[in-house]
Image: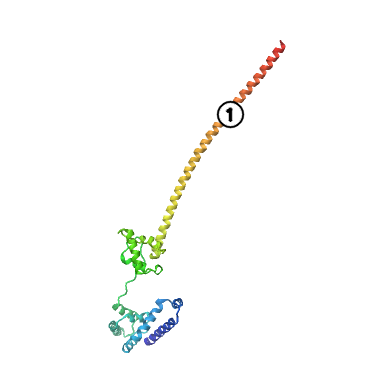
Amino acid sequence: MLSLNLDLNLKMGENLQQELEKFTDEKQKIAFIKQCGGQKKILPYLKFNEWWPSVSQEWRDKIVNLPFALINIKEWSYLAQLTLEELTHWYEEIIARSEKQFQENGIKILSPKVWVEAISKIIPKPKSTKRFLKLQQPIEDDDFNVLLNKKDYNFTPEILEEFKSSLCQASQDATIITEDLFPFLESRKLDPLLILSPSERSKWLLKKQQQELDKKDLELDSLRSQFNEVQQKLHQRDEQLQQQQQQINQLTQDNQEQQQQINQLFEQMKEFRQFMASAKAAA
């Protein structure tokens, strides 16, 4: 059963290798890899297919007769990472586990988990690569590798050293935090948010939005203050106009009264002249 499983995986790896060798155009090659599920999907096939021919017949016989039913290609590919000494230790661990299980319950066939567990004892799980930085995080030297690993940045080790030098000169030996990297990345027309995780990115965007809102609030407060000042001046102007209007009305009224007095005086003078003319005629 395991032998058939092995042959199928080897055949798949061989087919993939042949198909990849047909491509001369890199873009077509990348497109094919994506169609096959991506590099992580096909790389175990290629690694194992490359390693297996180097294995001696003695070891091939030992491996295909191991007490397993089915092993997926990722688990097969782990063997390609082992030296001969490590492979021997791994094999002895598998045989010991199988015999122990047989004594306990009469079953020799092991779970694929045992395959991986035995390898993990020999090859420790690699430390995960840091992909993101946190806001307000003091930047250590190793943290710059996050920039180096960003494909969109296209940083080479030389470019990274130049970047670090410019940053250190500007900081003047002060503690550098994540946000200090942003203007230097923007000056290179790079998106600084790529070094943040999605959650940290959301925090930063919310912070920037709040800053914009606060700025708008200050602008509105300033406009309100200017508007109130204009309103106050207009009110004062209205009061002045009202006072002037009142003065004009008063002057108009006074002028009308004076005109009435003059008209009355003219009437009195007219009557007096008529009286004098009548008196003179009677004499």
* Extreme-right residue of the structure: 282
Q: Looking at numbered disc 1 in the image, what kind of residue is underneath it?
A: Gln
Residue 72 in view, yes or no: no
Q: Secondary structure at mark 1?
A: helix
Residue at 41% over, 79% down:
42
Instruction: Give the quadrant of the N terminus.
Output: bottom left
Towards the viewer: 154 or 220: 154
Q: Quadrant of residue 254?
A: top right
The picture places residue 21, in percent across and down from the top left corner, at: 43, 82
Give the vertical position of 271 relative to 51 (above or below): above
Residue at 31% over, 65% down:
141
Q: Is residue 92 left or right of residue 23?
A: left
The picture places residue 2, in percent across and down from the top left corner, at: 37, 86
Give the vertical position of 168 relative to 98 (above or below): above
Q: Quadrant of residue 37?
A: bottom left
Residue identified by numbered label 1: 253
Give the vertical position of 4 relative to 184 (above or below): below
Q: Is residue 142 left or right of residue 204?
A: left
Q: Quadrant of residue 156?
A: bottom left
Towards the viewer: 19 or 73: 19
Towards the viewer: 205 or 191: 191
Towards the viewer: 2 or 230: 230
Residue 213 in view, yes or no: yes
The picture places residue 80, in percent across and down from the top left corner, at: 34, 81
The picture places residue 190, in percent across and down from the top left corner, at: 41, 64
Q: How many marks?
A: 1
How many C-alpha atoms fall within 10 Å of the one at disc 1: few (<14), some, or many (≥20)? few
